[in-house]
Image (cartoon, grey):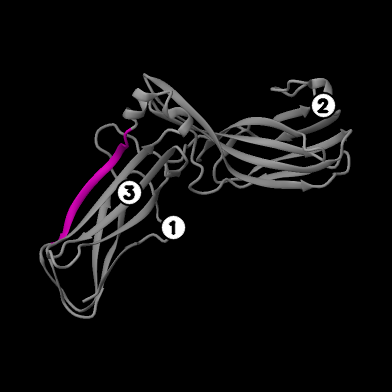
Amino acid sequence: MSVTLDIRLKRANKVYHAGESVAGVIVLSCKEAVQHHGIFLSMEGLVNLQLSSKSVGVFEAFYNSVKPIPLISCSTEVAKAGKVPGGKTEIPFEFPLNTKGNKALYETYHGVFVNIQYTLRCDLKRSLLAKDLSRNCEFIVHCQPQKEKLAATPINFTITPDTLQNTRERSSLPKFLIRGHLDTTNCVISQPLTGEVEVESSDIPIKSIELQLVRVETCGCAEGYARDATEIQNIQIAEGDVRPALPIPIYMVFPRLFTCPTLETTNFKVEFEVNIVIVLHDDHLITENFPLKLCRV
């Protein structure tokens, strides 16, 4: 006797803010009436932290202390033991999105070493002979937008062999001059990162110019901190040898779920950077790095 279980939220975009109610229906579909031992619904918000393989041996004590951080947890019985009639049954539910005490609700974020996730779970308990049914549904939490206007912080940059860092043999580098600007490094997460880059001169032809968005995740406690940078997305903004003094637009949309407002807590940090990467035909890589601060307004 098959029965299907589903959770449907009232909001199509599944986005909620602290203080609002997460509402929807549990949908049960079956051909014939089904006996059950209760239907339960739970809501959970967790921060999962993990260390990269390079950090495991360094922070043995810390590795044992990297436990999930609970943000919100509540459950309720939506239907007592009984029968679900044949056909389609909808059971409405509503959960207030409130934290206990002074805990904050962090924004939903899917990272590599930091993961902030909010889920609803529905369990339909059945007899020993029939397997229990369960269904998970993720919903998205956005932090409350800040009310004050975000001040733009434009930045101009010039890249030459002399400005590069982490270079061992500067004398062997080809000569080049690249200028540009970012319209702001204080970024609104719902708006694109914009700017321009210009190649004024280069001894070696250029193969490609790329825009690389990087997340910097830090997990730590008293024993130490593990900081790891990983790429989120890479956009090619120019291919082949570009004409000198041609303004090339910089335009990057921040991807949903893989970015969140810049976050700093006692146990972890989530920060963002953008790299402008110029690849020369001899496969020299020229990289200029800019820290970004992301906000929601």
Query: Which quadrant of the structure image shows residue 71?
Result: top left
C-alpha separation, residue under disc 3 versus residue under disc 1: 15 Å
- State the extent of the magenta-drawn residues as a range: 67-79
Q: Depth-wise, is mark 2 or mark 1 nearer the camera?
A: 2
Q: Earlier in the sequence, mark 3 or mark 1?
A: 1
**Which residue appears farthest toward the front when viewing the image?**
57
Q: Depth-wise, is mark 3 or mark 1 nearer the camera?
A: 1
Q: Secondary structure at mark 2?
A: loop
- The residue under label 2 is 173
Q: Amino acid at mark 3?
A: Glu
Whether label 3 touches label 1, CB < 8 Å:
no
Q: Earlier in the sequence, mark 2 or mark 3?
A: 3
Query: Which quadrant of the structure image shows residue 72?
Result: top left
C-alpha separation, residue under disc 2 versus residue under disc 3: 57 Å
Q: Residues within 10 Å of mark 2 (few under 14, many from 20)?
A: some
Q: Amino acid at mark 2?
A: Leu
- The residue under label 3 is 20
Q: Residues within 10 Å of mark 3 (few under 14, many from 20)?
A: few
- Seen at 15% across and 65% down, the residue is 126
Q: Which mark is residue 13?
A: 1
Whether label 2 touches label 3, CB < 8 Å:
no
Q: Secondary structure at mark 3?
A: loop
Residue 101 drawn in magenta? no
Q: Amino acid at mark 1?
A: Asn
Q: Which mark is residue 256?
A: none
Residue 33 is at least partly visible in this image = yes
User: Looking at the picture, how far across and down is residue 135, in whole percent?
Assistant: 29, 60
